[in-house]
Amino acid sequence: MNREIRTAVVTGGGHGIGRALCRRLHDDGIAVIVVDIDEKAAHAVASAIGGHAFTVDVGDEAAMADLIDAVERDIAPVDLFVSNAGVGYGDGAEGAASKEGGLHETEDRWESCWRVNVMAHVYAARSLVPRMIGRGGGFLVNIASAAGLLSQIGDAAYSATKHAAVAFADSLAITHGEQGINVSVVCPQAVATRMIGIEDDSDSKEGGFGGNDVDGVLSAAEVADRIVKGIREQEFLILPHPQVETYVRRKASDHDRWIAGMQRFRRKLLS
Ligand SMILES: NC(=O)c1ccc[n+]([C@@H]2O[C@H](COP(=O)([O-])OP(=O)(O)OC[C@H]3O[C@@H](n4cnc5c(N)ncnc54)[C@H](O)[C@@H]3O)[C@@H](O)[C@H]2O)c1
């Protein structure tokens, strides 16, 4: 792993991809700060790897600023910040523009997705970019999704906010890349975590799928390996599922045809 990275913060580190990433970074000798809204999960991961745990809602700007102040004051300068925490609720009964999400009917899923999937990345950058530039550079890694390049059928708020996350990463790299800020954005398709309804996110391909047979599902550990390789090679766009590049090229070359194909695919999923 890059010698310049000694301390890393991973949001959403209590479960899934974030947890796998905490373990992977720890294996590379990096001090890891595990951040999650789920206090118990954050502490469990931190104690297993000898790291620090913080309970934070990443969609709260003041809490994010306090987190970064506390880490830099009491632990060490943040060399790598991974904005991994994310939410998706599925479209409600009214479809793409609905307020409620299928799984969280009392929540305005649009508001929640904007805060967690986009603004949390902005809050991290606001606090860290000036500090990192002041000490010669740093790494910001934002976990978006293939839905941020293509679309997630049945989740408009997730798709729109993940597109925004990709666009924000573009802007960060364009504006601050030449000032030593190494930006990466990660766009996976399905990963075996609770987010796609797999309750046992133990990283075991044998035991972790709970009967789910979605094609091309990667384990969180495989995705963490791919992310670390991408960071080491200073890749901007990290695609754990390489086929996403082909799909993006097809979409860009004929958008109308791509929409028609997605409509057919949606009809098939609903039948
Ligand atoms: N699983 C997939 O198929 C998949 C595919 C593409 C992208 N992603 C993205 O990967 C990232 C990680 O997702 P995952 O699959 O590991 O899901 P997960 O649900 O297993 O983990 C998400 C973690 O984020 C935490 N979290 C949620 N809201 C938070 C908040 N407001 N503040 C702090 N922590 C919060 C959760 O407690 C949880 O620990 C997300 O950004 C997700 O959108 C996942």
Image (cartoon, helix red, strand yellow):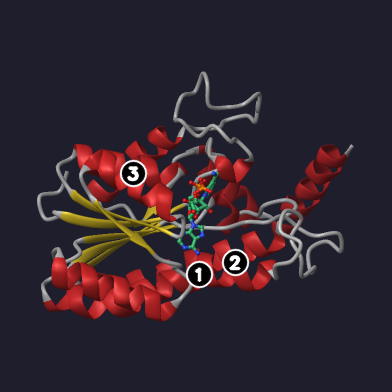
- Tell me: residue 84, above or below residue 130: above
**Amino acid marked by disc 1:** Val
Q: Which mark is residue 268?
A: none
Per the model, the C-alpha gap separating discs 1 and 3 is: 25 Å
**Amino acid marked by disc 3:** Val
Residue nearer the viewer, 123 or 194:
194
Q: Residue at x 57, y 58 (%)?
A: 87
Q: Which mark is residue 113?
A: 2
Q: Which residue is identified by label 1?
A: 118
Question: For this view, does 163 lie left or right of residue 108?
Answer: left
Residue 94 position within the rendered picture, expressed as x and y whole percent measured from the top left: 86, 64
Quarter-of-image position of residue 229: top left
Residue nearer the viewer, 150 or 58:
58
Question: For this view, does 98 lie left or right of residue 249?
Answer: right
Q: Residues within 10 Å of mark 1 (few under 14, many from 20)?
A: many
- Specify whether tag 1 is near ligand 1 (CB below 8 Å): no
Mark 1 lies on a secondary structure that is helix
Mark 2 lies on a secondary structure that is helix
On the rendered image, what quadrant is the C terminus found in? top right
Per the model, the C-alpha gap separating discs 2 and 1 is: 7 Å
Q: Residues within 10 Å of mark 3 (few under 14, many from 20)?
A: many
Asked whether the residues under the numbered discs 2 and 1 touch, taking CB atoms below 8 Å apart as contact, a structural biologist would say yes
Residue 126 position within the rendered picture, expressed as x and y whole percent measured from the top left: 33, 80
Mark positioned earlier in the residue sequence (2 or 1): 2
Residue nearer the viewer, 247 or 44:
44
Q: Residues within 10 Å of mark 2 (few under 14, many from 20)?
A: many
Q: Which mark is residue 45?
A: 3
- Please state which of the two labelled residues, at mark 2 or mark 3, is closer to the viewer: 3
Question: For this view, does 33 lie left or right of residue 154?
Answer: left
Mark 3 lies on a secondary structure that is helix
Is residue 229 visible in the rendered structure shown here?
no
Asked whether the residues under the numbered discs 1 and 3 touch, taking CB atoms below 8 Å apart as contact, a structural biologist would say no
